[in-house]
Amino acid sequence: MFKNFILIALRNLRRHSTYSIINISGLSIGIACSMLILLWVNDETSFDKFIPKSEKLYQVYTNAEFDENIVSWRSVPMPTYDEMKVADSHIVNSAVTGWGGERLMNVGDIRVMQDGYYVSEEFLDMFEFPLLRGNASEVLDDPSSIVISESLAEILFKGQDPLGQIVKVNDESLLKVTGIFKDVPSNSSFEFDYLIPWKHRLSIDPWAARNTTNWGNSSFQVFVELSKASDLTATNAGIKDVLTEKGQDDVPRWFFLHPMEDWRLHSNFEKGVATGGMSDYVKLFTVIAMFILVIACINFMNLSTARSERRAKEVGIRKTLGSKRSQIIFQFFGESILISVLSFVVAVLLTLVALPSYNDLVDKQLFLDFASADFWIFASIIIFATGILSGSYPSLYLSSFNPVKTLKGNVSTGKNGNTPRKVLVVLQFGFSIILIISTVVIMQQIKMVKARELGYNQENLLTIPMTDAISDNFEVINQALLRSGAVESITRSNSSITQVNSNNFLGWPGKPEAQRVMFVTIATEYDYAQTMGVEMLYGRDFSREFATDTAAIIINKTAMKLMGLEDPIGTQLDLWGDKRTLVGVIDDVLMGSPYEEVRPTFMILDPEWGGPVSVRLNATNDLQASIVKIQEVFEQYNPAYPFDYGFVDVAFQRKFTTINLTQKLVTIFAGLTIFITGLGLFGLASFTAQQRIKEIGIRKVLGASIPSLMKLMSKDFSRLVIVSFVIAAPLAWMLLNNYL
């Protein structure tokens, strides 16, 4: 019997080849879209899962209360590292790291810039990144050691045994290779090609060495390992008051642990609680994937019922010959599952074809793992769920026909027989409309954010990483660049114009005692405002003509409004226990998130903080020639390092990476959903035309024109679209109001 069912199913597919192609196309496109989306979702939700102890690893965060608001950040004082080892019995280990950065790796004639971290010796024991060579408990013990990735080993040593070899770092430190680790997966919160012992940093960095016991400088990352994940609540209670006990009681602040499993998905905090992050996008695209799949199934239902009258006599004959309704239902379910199998195969092929372009779009290395049991479980669920869902209504609908009536050619489903199909089409169009509205709104949001006043001029502004040689020769480089004719001005600061690296408290006359405000802090060189293209609203910039500017300060417009200063120049402000004279007020500059308000900011003249060099190029039609000129200068005074630079406008655009990706994906999948919905509409149109074929013939005989018939047929469909819009538009508004 089963063989007979298969033969009938194949015969029907072959007999109605056009219908079969349309049906398989709709389902396969829907499944392929869902697979692509879910591959991205799986990658996002699998971040750091390759680390064996991921559920026991946490980062120490700080909550601080300012003006009835709780702010959370992940930078902590360096002594937190040692304190965590004894702060609570549930903590079995702790590690301290820097923030990562590019450093020069030099072996012989090979010079490459690579990303890596300074880490304490516990790091590899805790995080267990797989080592190909070396012992995790020993490779970072020697302060003059370095552990490198297999890719970096190949670059530096070209197939030779790297263990015991010497790597020169930043043209100053000679470090011995003690271990090789597997390349870090792309779905890791850490991205690095080397690890250098923390003890080495302390030996070469006086600033870091001075902060080993300083509880007032939150500039480091500390991680802990718990004995059990269930110990989190107790541990948070045990470490909560550490900062207060160490004398940091100027504002209410306390430690808490943020789980590694939440670093990627829940990186945003509101009122001290992790609320969202990439999890918002994961939820969004999971819903999109599910709805696309459901819409594809609805499309199948409509196409199946549209041709039901053609198979009515078949059903009547089978019932007359003794077929039970259950057998007929099984037959149509079998056909549905067969179509699902064929659609899944086509969907896999479409996915494989689309993956290279899709990976470029989402900037990932996604792939279908055919060797994974999870893939085949997913395939089985998709095939049977899709087949049963898609075939449920057609099978029940067709099997319900009365055999006598069907053999007489009198098939009727009653006055409300079309209602289910209309509901399905309304649902299809409704979701398509939601996606269209969402796409338009997201595009408008991006346009609005990008149109915000920046407060500085991005044109011809570039940044260059700081090195010791550049720092030592900064004034000479400055003069050489100005003489080249390619540069208008040059400065350096503790952070680039597109990001915030430091925050501090600031006092002013009349400040309420209880008020605590975090100010963005810019430690800069001369010519900052000129180089960045920032307007000076009051007073002046730091100047070489004023030796007292080392005790001066500049604020932004938001800070001036906060302080309520009407005549700001000359005001004495309190910073770190000393008085600073206010010499200038600059316009607001959008440095942090483009989605947030500009924060109060102050600037001090202190180039020793370090940070990138910013260069304003002269306006020119030959930008490349200008870059060549400044490259010659930097290579002359910074010969050990390859010349590296980046344009500020490009760095600013990276702030929109996630939202731009969302826009592109939603647009693509909205278009595909509309296409699938069109196939569903075709199904209803075919069914309607089949039902009204005699009416159409009579109307044509009586002189009806084709345009009038098209108007007649489209009237009902137009009503469905209007109903869909009326339902979908408010839903889209509510969803977007919560999401954006």
Image (tube, helix red, strand yellow):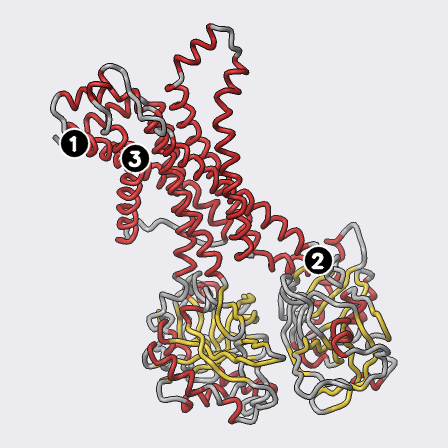
Instruction: Using the image, tell me which numbered label, if any, was put on residue 327.
Output: 1
| 385 sits to left or right of 496 | left
| 391 sits to left or right of 425 | left
Q: Earlier in the sequence, mark 3 or mark 2?
A: 3
Task: Give the percent coordinates (x, y) of residue 84.
Answer: 44, 87
Instruction: Give the residue displayed 42% in from the left and 76% down from the top.
Output: 58
Count neighbours of disc 3 (C-alpha within 10 A) and say few if under 14, some if 14 to 19, many if 20 or more.
many
Quadrant position of the N terminus in the picture: top left
Residue 688 visible? The answer is: yes
Quadrant position of the C terminus in the picture: bottom right
Give the residue at mark 3.
393
Disc 2, SS: loop
Q: Nearer the viewer, residue 189 or 447?
A: 447
Type of amino acid at the residue the image marks with label 1: Gln
Q: Nearer the viewer, residue 243 or 115?
A: 243
Type of amino acid at the residue the image marks with label 2: Arg
Q: Earlier in the sequence, mark 1 or mark 3?
A: 1
Count neighbours of disc 2 (C-alpha within 10 A) and say few if under 14, some if 14 to 19, many if 20 or more.
few
Q: Is residue 89 positioned above or below 604 on the image?
A: below
Say which quarter of the image contains residue 562.
bottom right
Q: Nearer the viewer, mark 3 or mark 2?
A: 3
Count neighbours of disc 1 (C-alpha within 10 A) and say few if under 14, some if 14 to 19, many if 20 or more.
some
Q: Are marks 3 and 2 in contact (CB under 8 Å)?
A: no
Q: Nearer the viewer, residue 1 or 375?
A: 1
Give the residue at mark 2.
452
Q: Is residue 391 positioned above or below 624 on the image?
A: above
Instruction: Give the residue displayed 43% in from the left and 45% down from the top.
Output: 355
Task: Give the percent coordinates (x, y) of residue 349.
Answer: 36, 39
Q: Earlier in the sequence, mark 2 or mark 1?
A: 1
Residue 197 visible? The answer is: no
Type of amino acid at the residue the image marks with label 3: Tyr
